[in-house]
Amino acid sequence: MGLRVEVIGDLSDQDTGFVGERLAAEHGAELVMHDRDALGGDADFADTQLLLLLGSIRSAHDPAQRGVVEAESQIVRGRLDVGVPVLGICYGAQLLAHALGGSVHEATHAEIGWYAVESADPDLCPSGPWSQFHSDAFTPPQTARVLGTSSAGCQAFSDDSRKARALAWQFHPEVTASRFITWSRQTRDYCAAHGVDPDVLIEQAPSHEPRLREASFALTDAAVAWLLRR
């Protein structure tokens, strides 16, 4: 039987990209999608073997999102406490930090493009460069081990303080070139407001894809091995 992976994401963007591709091909995963705006408890997560939290255009520190944030946080804590590991990406990493006692805030500067990280663990947080698309940052929970940083803040952490393990990446190992291009086109004003030319991103994205696919596959394998070790 393959790995049952429950995926929480925005209804408008549930693409698991390279990470989902590797989970399915190498680990026999069945990916079950959930709209984070429709979460109302964890009844649908009873058979979960891995919980994956995707990114979002929203901010976890936005007061208007408090209800959605707390519903997802409750699911995260509940799954960890019954032995289900959790993997969070970008907004998912921020949500995971919040759920475990950390905090989320606006970053001192945005990271939009491809950035290297300062790694403390080359297996669970290789130095990259990785795709980035965010202007929020997080403070990891006190129980966490920081795996990587950048000038914008924490880039990855692990936490094994509960029955199951948790792993968070601020960067986007899952993002394909086509998805990065779509984001760049959809957020032209956002990019420009942070001093980034979206047309340059669109032009450069395809050249990064071969390297990022291979790096993402290796990172996904390392994450699965670590998360499921218990």
Image (cartoon, rainbow, N blue to C red):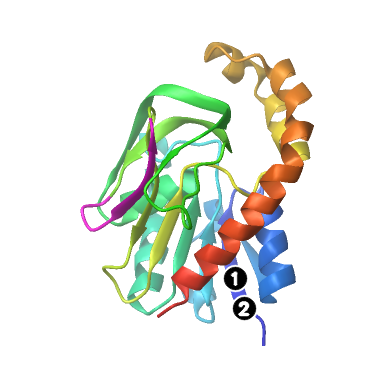
- From the viewer's perspective, is residue 220 above or below residue 13? below
Gap in angstroms between the C-alphas marked 1 and 2: 6 Å
Which residue is disc 1 drawn over?
Answer: 5
- Label 2 sits on a secondary structure element that is loop
Q: Main secondary structure of the magenta part?
A: strand
Looking at the image, the residue that sits furthest to the left is: 142
36 magenta-colored: no
147 magenta-colored: yes
Q: Are marks 1 and 2 in contact (CB under 8 Å)?
A: yes
Which residue is disc 2 drawn over?
Answer: 3
Q: Is residue 56 left or right of residue 179?
A: left
Classify mark 2: residues with Cα within 10 Å, few (<14), some (14-19) or many (20+).
Answer: some
* Quarter placement of the C terminus: bottom left
x, y percentage for residue 30?
68, 73
- Segment colored magenta: 141-150
Q: Is residue 111 left or right of residue 145?
A: right
Q: Is residue 82 visible?
A: yes
Residue at the location (23% across, 58% down)?
A: 143
* Quarter placement of the N terminus: bottom right
Classify mark 1: residues with Cα within 10 Å, few (<14), some (14-19) or many (20+).
Answer: many
- From the viewer's perspective, is residue 116 above or below residue 121? above
Q: Nearer the viewer, residue 22 or 77?
A: 22
| Kind of residue sitting beneath label 1 | Val
- From the viewer's perspective, is residue 178 above or below residue 218? above
Q: Quadrant of residue 182?
A: top right
Residue at the location (39% across, 29% down)?
A: 152
- From the viewer's perspective, is residue 61 above or below residue 194? below
x, y percentage for residue 160?
31, 67
Q: Quadrant of residue 148?
A: top left
x, y percentage for residue 227?
45, 70
Residue at the location (33% across, 55% down)?
A: 99
| Kind of residue sitting beneath label 2 | Leu
